Image: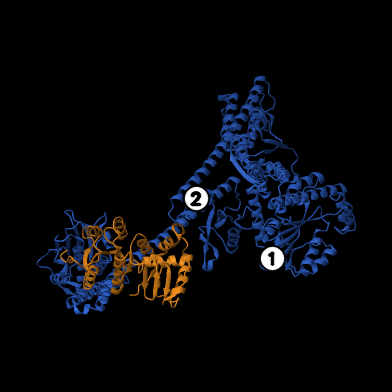
Chain colours: A orange, B blue
């Protein structure tokens, strides 16, 4: 705690058992103007979360004393602080589990710092601008959320009700990965959680209408084995 | 609504029945089809009809051959045979006569679509594969070849007796009714009796003079009409069954049938055969399942009776019945017990031929008692005469046993001796006492000799006593009335005592035999269940059976050879003498799952009796048993042998399962290691890699370049992580080289003090947190070591101690000489190694505490391997006063 965060900066808590990872994250993120708290195990992590009230948490799934998943779940019981999962496990199941238990995003080790920074930006911005204006802009896409008008390069695009609902779900969580299950529940309701096939079909339709090259999507990206994400263009 | 359902239920066919029907059809789908041309008598034109239809098939390009057709010198038939392909017959020499039989192997090799086989009920010449031709046909069918065949109705087992009763001529060659059931198609060749006679007289059936004899005996108009009746009825019964089957398969409701179950009592008597075929006829006509039950009582069966019993029980099986044997002192109770267990509705028994006094003793005749206790089971009492040929055979055999010269000789010599002694001692003992002496001899004789011999001995002694001792001596006349009385009393007493003693003895022998059987089986079961592998299982079974039957025993087991085919290999042939031919028989048994060889109808030329080792429907091997040529196997022995075989099969099956479980466990174990390795590699490699990439990409971020302090820090992180990765990879390589035994030591004299100081320098960052005390004996000699590797080995231990113990706890290193070794003790003051076996730390990928980040669990296993490579040894223990202590023993260099 000798390197405690200075006031005024956005604080990030890193919960990871590997001292090397913590050290380089601290150096790298401090360079970006964040202040860093460190925790090497679950117990310490939970303690820091309550005491320091960080604006964002980077959580490793493999912790010595407890599973990262249970840390995630206990934080989610009382806090909506954005959590980014950092994991060497690249089995999709644990990632999907984490996302569905309330994690905001994930990265698998090894990763590029730029990606981590982008995720951090998205999570923090969403958190601040949850109730942004009724018009959503992302690159050439413009969506008027109050009258449900979608334009691309200023040309109106006709979307079906389902396609619009899907787009809306992406906008509400723009930049964040959404699992298949989460999307299905948001658009079709709780009882349709099995029909990933129809989800794929509608994503396809949406890409046909919104992407320049639907075969190489740039806006709605596939996260293999996990779900989809809408890329944010600045 | 409910009523409707009930009615529907009622109409639905019995699922079991339907299943048997479907099975029957399935089986027939795989096997060849059997077509039988049935005639009432020879000469109605069965063979002719068969050949004609064969020609029809031949013109339709069906691959059809003649396996065996007898023309009986009939011209028309001969012409038809000419144009069909024929498989050459096999020539077998029997009692110096060459006999021709169908060559079944040639047929199977030729593998045609259809084969023609005349005279289904034919008995093969001894030395053929099967005793009967119908068995050949069954084997051909089993190989998927269709068979067209002919048979006369009198040869059908269940009709043979009726034919005998009508014509008075015993039928010698019979074939089981199951063949009729098995047939897919039956063609009745019907001819009016007048036409048959016409043909006979025209010489179309036999030659003229033979025809004349035939007309007088078999071919009488009355006989022919009766035979025609039997044939028509047989076919109509069969057609009736076909119709029922069809109805059931197609869900056509039929009138409700009561479920009959028939049971027939089987005895060791020729009369029993009659009852069995009667029951089978009855069962078939009412479409009911049936059993043949033999109740084993205390009564001892002679060798002949046993073979007769075996034959009768086989007959039950052949006719499609189920054999049940049970043990009970009382036949009536035994029968009723089985009947109740199997829900029998009708019991078939024969008219009792037991003597009235036996009936009196048991409280009523057999039939009376059965009637009294049978409750609502129907009893059929069937009369009739047995077919004479067999009873003749039997009485002949019985006579043979009456004449036992050996025993007569013993009696003669024994009684002569006692007579001489009595004659010498007569003045002192008196002639009345002589009788008691004779009685004594008889008593002893009864302990060892047969009952018939005892009767002879009794009579002989009575005559001797009378003639030589009673007044007037040397005449058969007896003057005193009390002497008469005495002689009669003597006779009665001697006979009763002799009879009782022999009976007691045989009963004891029987009980002993039964006891032996049970004990043997028990022992075998115990041995097999305690054996550890298939080899032990088989060995103990062989040993047991060899001792039990005084025979040579061998086990053959099926083994999978390349490309999935199974081959029968002698597993433990033991003392069995066998050749190619015997192996062929064993293969046959393994293939068809039926016993063969000696004592059977199949391949009976073999000197060995083979029984299949069967689990469910699969045959896993064969047991061969070779008893001495003059010995026979009794029914009981055969049962015992079968039991032994099934016990062995169970044992083998159990062991096979065990083995596959063991294999599976090994696979699981290696999978576990593989997974651990994978996890370890992915975690341990990716963590430093993530650091390196993270640092590098941070360096690439704009803005970083201005911060020199951050750049330096990031570069340091990259360096540390690279070192960590390098260590890990080095560990893996070392482990690999150690395991492949490719590590070469570069031995040179080393100073331990030097070695430890290098070591401590290497791990400086860690020992900052742990005070290390190093105590060395002063006069330590130089050791021949690989400096680099030994340093690595010891460093792993010290490094681990730093990692796994709380900060600021000391680590003690101590080296001293102990006889011919240098002992290095490295002790920490941590919590010790959890669990009871600290030696586990040397296992690959073992990690005592997964909470400590980093580490693969390889370090200490490498240390151990390295120290052992140096010829030393290492042990680990939890120190009684806390902490873990590693002790390394290294040999001192040889003083020269």
* Residue A222 spot, x, y in % from top left: 41, 71
Q: SS at mark 2?
A: helix
Mark closest to the chain's N terminus, 1 or 2: 1
Q: Is residue B825 left or right of residue B696?
A: left
Would residue B486 be visible to someone looking at this image? yes
Split into 4 quadrants, where in the image is the C terminus of chain B? bottom left
* Residue A139 spot, x, y in % from top left: 37, 75
Q: SS at mark 1?
A: helix
**Chain letter, disc 2 residue:** B
Q: Is residue A16 above or below residue B428?
A: below
Task: Please tell me in which quadrant of the rendered image residue A41 appears.
Answer: bottom left
Task: Judge by depth and name the residue closer to the eye, B209 or B106.
Answer: B106
Identify the disc placed on residue B289: none
Q: Is residue B61 above or below residue B293?
A: below
Q: Residue at x 46, y 64 (%)?
A: A196
Calculate the distance from the C-alpha at mark 1 to the C-alpha at mark 2. 41 Å
Kindly identify which residue carries mark 1: B107
Tell me the crowding category of disc 1: few under 14, some 14 to 19, or many 20 or more residues within 10 angstroms, Cα based: many
Task: Judge by depth and name the residue closer to the eye, B240 or A133.
Answer: A133
Whether marks 1 and 2 lie on the same chain = yes
Kindly identify which residue carries mark 2: B544
Task: Judge by depth and name the residue closer to the eye, B785 or A32.
Answer: A32
Q: Is residue A43 left or right of residue B328?
A: left
């Amino acid at each position: 705690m000798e390197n405690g965060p200075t006031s005024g900066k956005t604080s990030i808590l890193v919960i990871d058992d590997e001292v090397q990872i913590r050290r380089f994250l601290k150096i790298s993120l401090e360079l970006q103007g964040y202040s860093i708290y460190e925790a090497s195990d679950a117990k310490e992590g939970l303690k820091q979360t309550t005491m320091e009230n960080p604006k964002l948490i980077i959580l490793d799934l493999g912790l010595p004393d407890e599973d990262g998943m249970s840390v995630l779940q206990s934080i989610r019981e009382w806090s909506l602080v954005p959590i980014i999962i950092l994991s060497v496990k690249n089995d999709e199941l644990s990632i999907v589990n984490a996302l569905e238990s309330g994690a905001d995003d994930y990265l698998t080790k090894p990763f590029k710092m730029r990606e981590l920074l982008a995720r951090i930006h998205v999570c923090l911005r969403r958190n601040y601008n949850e109730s942004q204006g009724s018009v959503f802009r992302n690159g050439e896409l413009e969506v008027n959320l109050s009258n449900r008008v979608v334009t691309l390069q200023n040309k109106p695009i006709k979307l079906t009700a389902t396609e619009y609902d899907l787009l809306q779900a992406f906008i509400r969580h723009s930049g964040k990965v959404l699992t298949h299950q989460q999307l299905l529940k948001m658009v079709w309701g709780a009882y349709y959680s099995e029909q990933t096939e129809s989800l794929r079909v509608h994503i396809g339709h949406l890409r046909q209408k919104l992407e320049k090259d639907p075969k190489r999507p740039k806006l709605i990206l596939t996260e293999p084995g996990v779900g989809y994400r809408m890329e944010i263009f600045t | 609504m409910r009523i409707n359902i009930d009615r529907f239920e009622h109409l639905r066919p019995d699922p079991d029945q339907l299943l048997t029907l479907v099975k029957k059809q399935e089986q027939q789908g795989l096997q060849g089809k059997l077509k039988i041309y049935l005639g009432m008598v020879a000469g109605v034109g069965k063979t002719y009809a068969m050949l004609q239809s064969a020609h029809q098939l031949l013109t339709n390009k069906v691959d059809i051959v003649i396996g065996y057709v007898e023309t009986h010198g009939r011209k028309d038939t001969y012409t038809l045979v000419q144009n069909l392909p024929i498989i050459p017959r096999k020539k077998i020499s029997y009692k110096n006569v060459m006999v021709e039989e169908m060559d079944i192997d040639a047929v199977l090799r030729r593998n045609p679509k259809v084969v023609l086989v005349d005279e289904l009920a034919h008995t093969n010449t001894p030395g053929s594969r099967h005793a009967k031709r119908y068995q050949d046909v069954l084997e051909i069918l089993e190989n998927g070849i269709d068979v067209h065949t002919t048979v006369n109705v009198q040869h059908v087992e269940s009709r043979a007796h009726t034919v005998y009763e009508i014509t008075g001529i015993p039928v010698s060659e019979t074939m089981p009714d199951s063949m009729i059931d098995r047939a897919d198609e039956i063609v009745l060749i019907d001819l009016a009796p007048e036409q048959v006679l016409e043909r006979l007289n025209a010489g179309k059936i036999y030659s003229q003079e033979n025809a004349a004899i035939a007309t007088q005996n078999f071919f009488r108009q009355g006989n022919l009409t009766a035979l025609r009746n039997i044939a028509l009825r047989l076919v109509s019964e069969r057609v009736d069954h076909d119709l029922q089957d069809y109805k059931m398969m197609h869900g056509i409701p039929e009138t409700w049938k009561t479920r009959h179950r028939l049971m027939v009592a089987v005895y060791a008597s020729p009369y029993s055969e009659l009852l069995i075929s009667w029951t089978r006829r009855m069962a078939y006509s009412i479409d009911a399942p049936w059993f043949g039950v033999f109740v084993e009582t205390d009564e001892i069966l002679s060798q002949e009776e046993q073979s007769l019993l075996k034959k009768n029980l086989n007959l039950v099986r052949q006719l499609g019945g189920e054999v049940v044997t049970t043990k009970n002192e009382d036949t009536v109770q035994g029968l009723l017990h089985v009947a109740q267990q199997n829900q029998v509705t009708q019991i078939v028994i024969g008219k009792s031929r037991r003597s009235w006094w036996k009936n009196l003793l048991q409280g009523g005749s057999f039939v009376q008692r059965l009637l009294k206790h049978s409750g609502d089971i129907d009893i059929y009492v069937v009369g009739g005469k047995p077919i004479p040929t067999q009873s003749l055979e039997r009485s002949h055999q019985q006579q043979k046993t009456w004449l036992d010269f050996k025993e007569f000789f013993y009696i003669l010599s024994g009684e002569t001796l006692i007579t001489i002694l009595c004659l010498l001692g007569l003045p002192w003992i008196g002639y009345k006492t002589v009788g008691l002496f004779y009685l004594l001899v008889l008593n002893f004789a009864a302990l060892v000799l047969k009952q018939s011999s005892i009767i002879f001995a009794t009579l002989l002694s009575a005559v001797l006593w009378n003639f030589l001792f009673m007044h007037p001596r040397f005449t058969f006349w007896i003057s005193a009335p009390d002497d008469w009385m005495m002689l009669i009393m003597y006779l009665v007493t001697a006979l009763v005592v002799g009879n009782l003693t022999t009976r007691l003895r045989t009963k004891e022998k029987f009980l002993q035999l039964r006891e032996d059987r049970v004990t043997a089986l028990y022992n075998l079961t115990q041995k097999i269940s305690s054996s550890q592998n298939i080899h032990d299982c088989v060995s103990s079974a062989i040993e047991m059976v060899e001792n039990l039957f005084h025979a040579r025993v061998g086990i053959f087991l099926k083994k999978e050879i390349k490309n999935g085919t199974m081959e029968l290999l002698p597993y433990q042939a033991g003392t069995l003498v066998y050749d190619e031919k015997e192996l062929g028989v064993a293969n046959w048994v393994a293939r068809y799952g039926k016993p063969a060889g000696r004592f059977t109808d199949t391949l009976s030329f073999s000197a060995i009796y083979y029984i299949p080792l069967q689990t469910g429907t699969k045959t896993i091997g064969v047991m061969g048993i070779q008893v001495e040529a003059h010995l026979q196997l009794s029914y009981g022995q055969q049962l015992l042998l079968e039991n032994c075989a099934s016990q062995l099969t169970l044992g083998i099956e159990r062991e096979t399962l065990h083995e596959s479980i063991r294999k599976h466990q090994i696979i699981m174990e290696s999978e576990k290691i593989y997974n651990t390795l994978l996890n370890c590699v992915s975690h341990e490699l990716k963590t430093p890699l993530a650091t390196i990439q993270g640092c590098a990409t941070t360096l690439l971020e704009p803005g970083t370049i201005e911060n020199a302090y951050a750049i330096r820090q990031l570069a340091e992180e990259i360096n540390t992580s690279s070192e960590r990765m390098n260590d890990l990879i080095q560990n893996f390589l070392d482990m690999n080289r150690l395991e492949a035994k490719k590590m070469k030591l570069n031995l040179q004299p080393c100073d331990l003090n030097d070695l430890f100081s290098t070591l401590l320098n290497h791990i400086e960052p860690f020992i900052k947190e742990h005070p290390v005390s190093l105590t060395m004996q002063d006069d330590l000699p130089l050791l021949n070591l690989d400096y680099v590797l030994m340093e690595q080995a010891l460093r792993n231990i010290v490094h681990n101690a730093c990692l796994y113990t709380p900060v600021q706890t000391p680590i003690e290193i101590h080296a001293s000489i102990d006889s011919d070794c240098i002992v290095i003790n490295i002790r920490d003051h941590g919590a010790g190694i959890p669990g009871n076996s600290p030696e586990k730390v040397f296992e690959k990928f073992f990690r005592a505490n997964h909470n400590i980040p980093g580490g693969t669990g390889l370090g200490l296993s490498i240390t151990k391997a390295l120290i052992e490579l140096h010829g030393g040894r290492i042990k680990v223990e939890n120190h009684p006063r806390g902490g873990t202590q590693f002790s390394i023993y290294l040999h001192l260099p040889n003083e020269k």
